[in-house]
Image (cartoon, grey):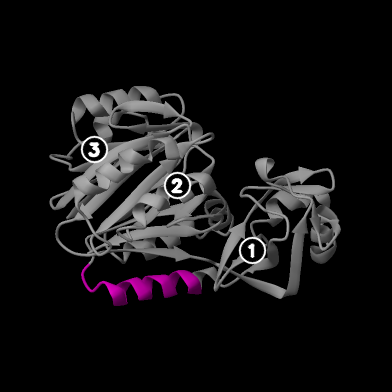
Amino acid sequence: MRQFFGTSRHGNLKEAVQGLGRPQFIMLFSNDGQFDAHVRELENLYPGVPSIGCIGMSYDIRVVENGVSVIAFLDGVSAVANVLEQVSVMPVKYIRRMEEDIKKVGGSQKDTVCIDLCSGNDACVLTTIHTALKYKNISLVGGTGDGGRVSANGRVYEDAVAYALVRNQGGKVKTYKENIYRQMGDHRFIASNTDKANYILGSLNGQPARQVYQNILHISEQQIPTQTFKNPFGKLNGDDTCIISIKEVKGNALACFRQVNDSDVLVLLELADYRATVKETIAVIKKDFPKISAVFSVNCLFRYKLFSEQHYMEEYLKDMRTLGSHAGFVGYGEHYNNRFVNQSMTCVVFE
């Protein structure tokens, strides 16, 4: 299979798809003002080709912050795209669609991946999707777009998750998750006074969460929203750690970008040697895949901001390019199988 990346910084979709002949699956990444029009235009240009899309930044060797970009797979994939609606209320109501689509694509754990683009309520969405994917052990990579809208097959949806099941006819697929943080000291907390609906973390070990965070890091309240780039929280999940980003201060509490529950065990994280971590990830992928056709990744907005501040983003994309054809988008939250994570990178590699 092959991966195509095309872009227009002026929002000209025809310019972005120049040279794209007969795609078998398309992803659209557009800006808020032109998204709806681009969705309709893409369907007119490639009628019947499975497609999903969202509002967001994209990249290959550089980041496209505005305009429009298209990532397409061709020459050796089969795909089906669809949508689960009412994700804030009852996404399971539509799960039969995915179950039927899994039968259509006929894939397996070895050669098939699910790519999703979500408008919100990610944790519930992923739990729902996993009920269908688990029977074939199909992996998932995806993320959250901006603006509360996604698209599937030429239609725009609010309060929904667009997904595609993509089968590699020429080899295997495998998903990866990258964490550039490590545990800081021996800080360990029991969360309490949480508000699950609003992702509020009220107390840590019985003390106000804002105060605990400030006291450990010796920072002002105003520094908290950007300090999370270097010191997010982590939720222990077996041998893995799910990163929890801080969104803003709410009185003595902290609003986060993913749900925290009472009695969750949290740790404080610190930024590790991210350059070394990226090189390690690339080495692992190269070992697993002597021949790579494409890599599609999702990088967190906070990773993008951190790498940009450190003047590393272009170097990062050059490093990833050593794998071959690499493209992706900047998400507001990353999806990895049934997990919703923050400040991470997830990707799928095609043989």
Mark 3 and mark 1 lie on one chain; the one further toward the N terminus is: 3
Kind of residue at badge 3: Pro
Kind of residue at badge 1: Gly
Foreground mark, 2 or 1, reads 2
Q: CA distance from mark 3 to mark 2?
A: 22 Å
Kind of residue at badge 2: Thr
Element type at marker 2?
Answer: helix
The correct choice, above or below, for 162 with respect to 123 in the image is above
- Magenta stretch in the rendered image: 276-291
Instruction: Say if residue 41 shows up in the picture.
Output: yes
Is 108 colored magenta in this rendering? no
Mark 2 and mark 1 lie on one chain; the one further toward the N terminus is: 2
Instruction: Say if residue 28 shows up in the picture.
Output: no
The correct choice, above or below, for 194 with respect to 181 in the image is above
- Taking the spot 32% from the left edge, 43% from the top edge, the residue there is 98
Image coords of residue 141 (percent x, y): 39, 54
Q: Quadrant of the C terminus?
A: bottom left
Is residue 204 or residue 14 the one in the foreground? 204
Could you classify mark 3 by the number of other residues whose Cα lies within 10 Å: few (under 14), some (14-19), or many (20 or more)?
A: many
Could you classify mark 2 by the number of other residues whose Cα lies within 10 Å: few (under 14), some (14-19), or many (20 or more)?
A: many
Position of residue 41 in the picture relative to residue 36 (left or right): left
Predominant secondary structure, magenta span = helix
Is 289 colored magenta in this rendering? yes
Element type at marker 3?
Answer: loop
Q: Which residue is mark 2?
A: 128
Image coords of residue 254 (percent x, y): 75, 49
Q: Which residue is mark 1?
A: 234
Q: CA distance from mark 2 to mark 1?
A: 23 Å
Kindly indicate the quadrant of the structure image that contains residue 25: top left
The correct choice, above or below, for 330 with respect to 162 in the image is below
- On residue 50, the disc is 3
Could you classify mark 1 by the number of other residues whose Cα lies within 10 Å: few (under 14), some (14-19), or many (20 or more)?
A: many
